[in-house]
């Protein structure tokens, strides 16, 4: 089982063996905006879901804390998200970046999400410690192109369906167990930014404490296949 390690604000450390991984999709709190986004994606050839929001089971070993993501072509990109991590004692909240194969996405969203890892931060908050102001927590992402980077996503957790909603969905499936990780779905990308870069950084900031949790990775191009 893959193991994740999180540093908590009180200086303690939590180790979690991942047994199940889920990616939420089309998870904006305003579902009218989600419907408009689905229409935009349909024009790019991405098949529309049968229902929203969606939940995709992902291979559990794709929950990773890494600074490198290996890709086979340039049409891949990340998505700024939060992640719930269920431990033996509590639920943790951390930052995540769902790296997605956009070429494969036109054939199947679930396929594309299983083609690259979900990169998680190495620090986390206890969900109970931030539950009373979750909507105020900010989420931002930058895409890197060589030595430069550009802001590509900016919003708050209030833009997305709540952790409580997804914990309820997991409970209904009997999946609210230690070792389960759920990635939230993403916020909108800013228009006019080239999403196909070579590095991604995501930050989640709690305005009540000014504490920021982040994750960062670079993409590594794999050699051309032989034959």
Image (tube, helix red, strand yellow):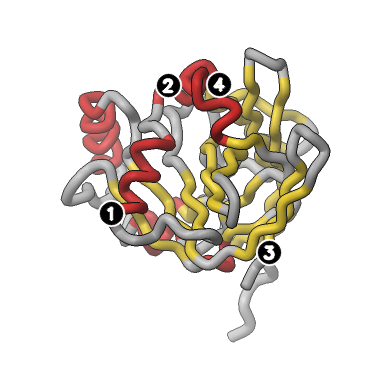
Q: Position of residue 197 (x, y in %)?
A: 63, 41
Residue name at image x 55 percent, y 61 percent = 179
Identify the residue position indicated by label 3 in the image: 3
- Which residue bears the numbered disc 4? 137
**Whole-number angstrom distance, CA of label 4 to CA of label 1:** 27 Å
- SS state under label 2: helix
Residue 130 in the image, given as x and y percentages of width and height: 57, 26
In the rendering, which numbered label is found on residue 172? Answer: 1
- Determine contact: label 1, label 3, CB under 8 Å: no
Viewer-side label of 1, 3: 1
For the N terminus, the quadrant is: bottom right
- Within 10 Å of the Cα at label 2, are there few (<14), some (14-19), or many (20+) other Cα atoms? some
Distance from label 1 to label 2 (Cα)? Answer: 23 Å
The reply to whether residue 77 is in sight is no
Q: Which residue is mark 2?
A: 158
129 or 206: which is nearer to us?
129
């Amino acid at each position: 089982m893959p193991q994740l390690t999180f540093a908590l604000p009180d200086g303690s450390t939590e180790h979690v063996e991942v047994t199940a991984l889920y990616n939420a999709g089309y998870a904006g709190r305003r579902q009218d905006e989600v419907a408009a986004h689905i229409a935009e994606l349909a024009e790019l050839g991405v098949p529309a879901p049968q229902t929203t929001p969606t939940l995709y089971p992902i291979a559990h070993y794709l929950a990773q804390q890494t600074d490198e993501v290996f890709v086979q072509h340039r049409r891949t990109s990340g998505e700024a998200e939060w992640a719930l991590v269920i431990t033996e004692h509590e639920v943790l909240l951390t930052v995540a970046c769902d790296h997605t194969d956009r070429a494969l996405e036109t054939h199947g969203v679930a396929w594309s999400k299983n083609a690259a890892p979900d990169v998680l931060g190495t620090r986390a908050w206890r969900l109970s410690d931030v539950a009373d102001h979750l909507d105020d927590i900010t989420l931002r992402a930058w895409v890197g192109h060589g030595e430069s980077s550009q802001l590509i996503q900016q919003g708050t957790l209030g833009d997305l369906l709540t952790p409580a909603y997804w914990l309820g969905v997991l409970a209904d499936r009997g999946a609210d167990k230690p070792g389960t990780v759920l990635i939230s779905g993403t916020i909108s990308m800013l228009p006019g930014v080239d999403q196909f870069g070579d590095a991604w950084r995501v930050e989640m900031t709690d305005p009540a404490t000014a504490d920021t949790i982040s994750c960062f990775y670079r993409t590594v191009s794999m050699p051309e296949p032989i034959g």
